[in-house]
Amino acid sequence: MLAEDRRNRLRAAMNGAGIEALVVYGNSWQSDYLRYVADFSSIEGHGMAVVTPDGAVELFVDSVAEAERAEAETSGIKVSLAPEIVREVAGRLERIANHRIAAAPLGFMPKYIAEKARGYKLEDGTKLVDHLLMVKTPAEIDTLRKAAKLADDGYAVFRQAARPGRKQYELIADIEGFFRKNGCADNFMIMGSGGKDVYAMAPPSDRIIKPGDMVTTELTPAVHGYFAQICRTMVLGKANDAQKKAHALYREAMEAGIAAAKPGATAADVARAENDVFRKRGYGDYATSKYTRVRGHGLGLFVDTKPHILEDVDTVLEAGMVMIVHPNTYHPEVGYMVLGDSIAITPTGAEVLTGTPREIFEV
């Protein structure tokens, strides 16, 4: 149902823009454009899909394993094994060269396909597909609510798994096992453990968790391909006064960002609301790119999609957008700290999808 709804929305958007055909690209890291069109995410190699003028979808993959998986996991589309995927897709586009063809994202297209010397002309369809990816249908938002509930449940497992003497990857193994048992095939997760020496989160290592460590995580499970995220911080033992004071700063910033997230506001407005809290408390430098990347980002068919919550991003928020607001950054007194909730933009404000208490947990 979700895949069929997406294709119907895509065809309507293409018709409205006068676009007759569309080509999209995806790989093992970012395949949300491909997933939107073909309901397929690449695990290895490259994938491309072409929507032809009659509305049919053809998925091209460049490995036998991916072709077999696509045949088993998709319906209503044609799957083509294309070892020379770039040339074969270019040939397919040349056969419809007399139509208006758009590419999304155009900047990701292999050079051979995007070259202007080809027998067809590609227009930039990135904004058209971006809007479909960002503004969700009620069914998509309902799916993201389920993913957010799974994120809450997963964080409860994470808290139980965090014990002195365990290695970081052992905690992650517990989480992955929990998600697999609950039908979640994909989860993006990074973490950190330690004190002032920790400047960010990363994939799990063999670092041993010790009493007194501050343990952070960004946990992002998917339901039917839709990712929701939660960010929380815990302490193994009792949180000290500095950690409690720092956490209160992050909570104030996150709640200011969520309050600013409403239709008509921009991504910049949300970022500014978060950063102003840090600036007001004398920590403005830690809200800059020197210590942090984004103050949140979109969620959906990719773990880190548009709009990115930054003060120079002027994307206007609309009802139906789903994102995480997270003022994650380094704190000079305690180290890297995180706090973030997934939200859906409603006609009047923001619906918070994650329900884990906004506290610094003591384990």
Image (cartoon, grey):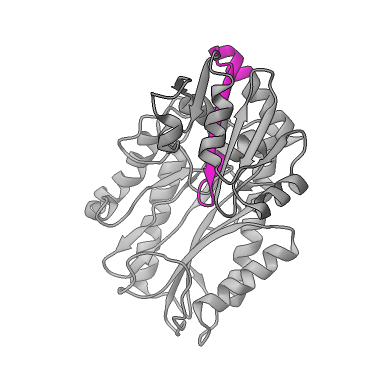
Q: Residue at x 36, y 65 (%)?
A: 336
Residue 350 vertical placement versus 281 (above, below): above
Which residue appears at 47% of the width and 42% of the height?
258
Which percent across, then down, holds residue 362?
Answer: 51, 74
Q: Is 196 positioned to the left or the right of 115 in the image? A: left
Identify the image quadrant of residue 74.
Answer: top right
Q: Is residue 29 magenta?
A: yes
Foreground of the two, 319 or 47? 47
The image position of residue 127, as x and y in percent, is 47, 26
> Which residue is more in the foreground, 308 or 87?
87
- The structure residue drawn at horizontal position 48% and vertical position 64%, both measured from the top left corner, is 190
Percent of width and height locating residue 315: 41, 29
Residue 150 occupies quadrant: bottom right
| Quarter containing the C terminus | bottom right
**As displayed, is residue 200 above or below residue 85?**
below
Above-or-below relation of 91 to 119: below
What x and y, as percent, mark residue 44?
A: 57, 54
Tell me the magenta residue range.
12-32
Q: Is residue 361 above or below residue 210?
A: above
Whether residue 327 sits left or right of residue 28 in the image: it is left
Can see residue 348? no
Q: Is residue 322 magenta?
A: no
Residue 276 in sight in this render: yes
Quarter-of-image position of residue 163? bottom right
Q: How many marks?
A: 0
- In the displayed structure image, the side of residue 301 where residue 212 appears, left or right: left
- Nearest the eye: 337 or 9: 9
- Of the 4 image quadrants, the one containing the N terminus is top right
